[in-house]
Amino acid sequence: MQAVKMYTTQVCPYCLRAKALLKQKGVESIEEIRVDLDPSQRQYMMSLTGRRTVPQIFIGDTHVGG
């Protein structure tokens, strides 16, 4: 299975729901990158996706949105 990476914040209800859905679909490990703790990570996320909101989810190298 490909690695799953999710850009998230602590209080985002959409992030919590996305994580629950991925777990329900059998994803065992999600690398969470908290953009609320590290603003440079939000800037990097925006450069990758062109989006500012979370969650932003990558499966392998493929951006699947949020």
Image: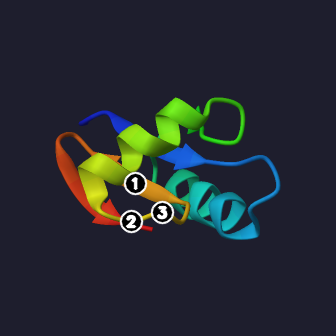
| Residue 31 is at least partly visible in this image | no
Tell me what residue is drawn at x 48 percent, y 63 percent: 52
Q: The residue tagged with tag 2: helix, strand or loop?
A: loop
Tag nearer the camera, 2 or 1: 2
How far apart, in angstroms, are the residues tagged by discs 3 and 2?
4 Å
Residue highlighted by disc 2: 51
Q: Position of residue 6 (x, y in %)?
A: 48, 45
How far apart, in angstroms, are the residues tagged by discs 1 and 3?
13 Å
| Residue 49 is at least partly visible in this image | yes
Tell me what residue is drawn at x 67 percent, y 67 percent: 17
Classify mark 1: residues with Cα within 10 Å, few (<14), some (14-19) or many (20+).
Answer: many
Q: Is residue 15 above or below residue 6?
A: below
**Which amino acid, mark 3?**
Arg
Label ID, residue 37: none
How far apart, in angstroms, are the residues tagged by discs 2 and 1?
11 Å
Residue highlighted by disc 1: 57
**Which amino acid, mark 1?**
Ile
Q: Are marks 3 and 2 in contact (CB under 8 Å)?
A: yes
Q: Quadrant of residue 1?
A: top left
Tell me what residue is drawn at x 76 percent, y 68 percent: 13
Q: Position of residue 39 (x, y in %)?
A: 59, 36
Q: Position of residue 19 (x, y in %)?
A: 60, 54
Classify mark 3: residues with Cα within 10 Å, few (<14), some (14-19) or many (20+).
Answer: few
Q: The residue tagged with tag 3: helix, strand or loop?
A: loop
Tag nearer the camera, 1 or 3: 3
